[in-house]
Amino acid sequence: MEKEKKKVKTTQQTDAADHSEAEWVEGTGEKAEELKIELEKANQQAAENFEGWQRERADFLNYKKRIERDRVSNVQAITSDIVKNFLVILDDLERALKARPVSGDGAAWAEGIELIYRKLQTQLEAKGVTRIPAESQEFDPNLHEAITHEDNPDFESGQIIEVIEQGYLLGDRVVRPARVRVAR
């Protein structure tokens, strides 16, 4: 009888263990589903965070580029304003050299004026200031300012006859348009 009791007890224990295991497997299945759902939510949140981070990074890079463009533009605007002041002096020196005396004391003085003129021109060129090509060119309203329109048989319509005042560029930016006479 004792063997039967042991057998019954062992069977009961086995049944209990099987029952526990079944509960555990069933509980694990439910827990696994919960964990899968949690993992999926975490992955979705991570993907959203990553996308948000990428957007913010792109926005920041665009911001940096815009700030740099604005800075360069501001530097060019300030430089352009300063250069305009020197262009007036350059114009005066050009006019003085057009009426330069050929001989006597005035000739030596004119050489000194020409030296100053060349130095000023060299300094402006070093800062990126260049003359706008105008003589015998086609009129371009972005680069030239027409003072007069004249009939001239030697030039085609729209061609520049004469440059009244030189125009200058600072890089790609027009500091001052060339003032010109244009053929009709």
Image (spheres, helix red, strand yellow):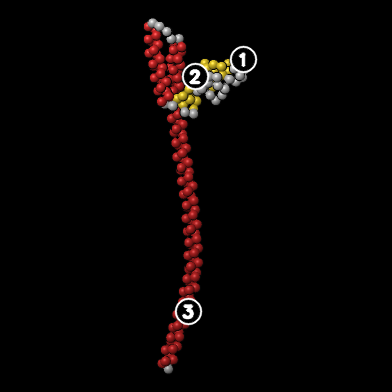
- Graded by Cα atoms within 10 Å as few (under 14), some (14 to 19) or many (20 or more), the crowding at tag 1 reads few
Whichever of labels 3 and 1 marks the residue nearer the N terminus, that label is 3
Query: Circle 3 — which element?
Result: helix
Residue 113, above or below 63: above
Give the amino acid type for the residue marked by disc 2 in the picture.
Gln
- In-front residue for pair 5/48: 48
- Residue 43 tag number: none
Q: CA distance from mark 2 to mark 3?
A: 102 Å
Residue behind mark 1: 153
Query: Circle 2 — which element?
Result: loop
The residue located at (49%, 19%) in the rendering is 166
The residue located at (44%, 36%) in the rendering is 68
- Whole-percent x, y for residue 61 in the image: 46, 42
- Whole-percent x, y for residue 89 in the image: 43, 17
Task: Tell me the quadrant of the picture where the C terminus can be found.
Answer: top right
Give the amino acid type for the residue marked by disc 1 in the picture.
Pro
Residue 176 in sight in this render: no
Residue 161 in sight in this render: yes
The residue located at (48%, 76%) in the rendering is 22
Foreground label between 1 and 2: 1
In the rendered structure, the answer to whether residue 67 lies left or right of residue 136 reads: left
The residue located at (58%, 18%) in the rendering is 182
Residue behind mark 2: 166
Foreground label between 2 and 3: 2
State the image quarter where residue 85 is shown.
top left
Residue behind mark 3: 19
